[in-house]
Image: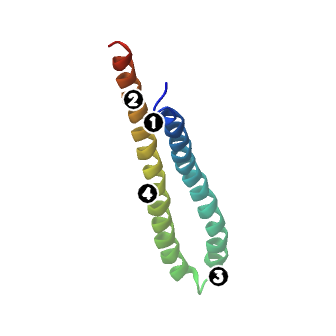
């Protein structure tokens, strides 16, 4: 197809790839982040004096980290679904034009 939108599907594919990477990357990074943090919290939990404070901080830390990573993951999924929807609509539009 000639014209200004001849690379539109290519760019939609790039956008979907980036969005999927954002979603899956956030999921993987959350696991790594919480795993590394748990090692430090286990050390603090082993010391009786720091145990009560470290448990409270761990709960807060993990809650904030989960909300942050889940937000990025959700944004990636939303963008990917939007791009897929735009690609489908563009394909239908082009098909309608070819039938004229």
Task: From the image, tell me which residue sits under label 3.
Answer: 47
Distance CA(mark 3)–CA(mark 2):
61 Å
Q: Counting residues from the N terminus, which is met first, the one under dot 3 or under dot 4?
A: 3
Distance CA(mark 1)–CA(mark 3):
66 Å
Examine the image and state in which quarter residue 35 appears. bottom right
Q: Nearer the viewer, residue 95 or 35?
A: 95
**Residue at the image position 33 percent from the left and 18 percent from the top:** 96
**Label 2, residues with CA under 10 Å away: few <14, some 14-19, many ≥20:** some
Q: Counting residues from the N terminus, which is met first, the one under dot 4 or under dot 2?
A: 4
Task: From the image, tell me which residue sits under label 2.
Answer: 90
Q: Mark 1 or 3, which is nearer the eye?
A: 1
**Dot 4 lies on which element?**
helix
Q: Is residue 90 left or right of residue 24?
A: left
Task: From the image, tell me which residue sits under label 1.
Answer: 4
Q: Is residue 37 left or right of residue 59?
A: right
Q: Mark 3 or 2, which is nearer the eye?
A: 2
**Label 1, residues with CA under 10 Å away: few <14, some 14-19, many ≥20:** few
Q: Residue furthest bottom?
A: 49
Q: Position of residue 26 (x, y in %)?
A: 55, 54
**Residue at the image position 45 percent from the left and 36 percent from the top:** 4
């Amino acid at each position: 197809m000639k014209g200004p939108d001849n690379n539109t599907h290519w760019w939609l594919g790039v956008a979907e790839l980036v969005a999927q990477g954002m979603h899956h990357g956030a999921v993987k990074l959350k696991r790594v982040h919480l795993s590394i943090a748990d090692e430090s919290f286990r050390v603090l939990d082993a010391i009786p004096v720091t145990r009560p404070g470290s448990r409270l901080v761990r709960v807060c830390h993990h809650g904030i980290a989960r909300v942050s990573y889940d937000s990025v993951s959700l944004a990636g999924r939303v963008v990917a679904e939007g791009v897929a929807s735009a690609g489908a609509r563009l394909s239908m539009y082009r098909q309608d034009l070819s039938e004229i």
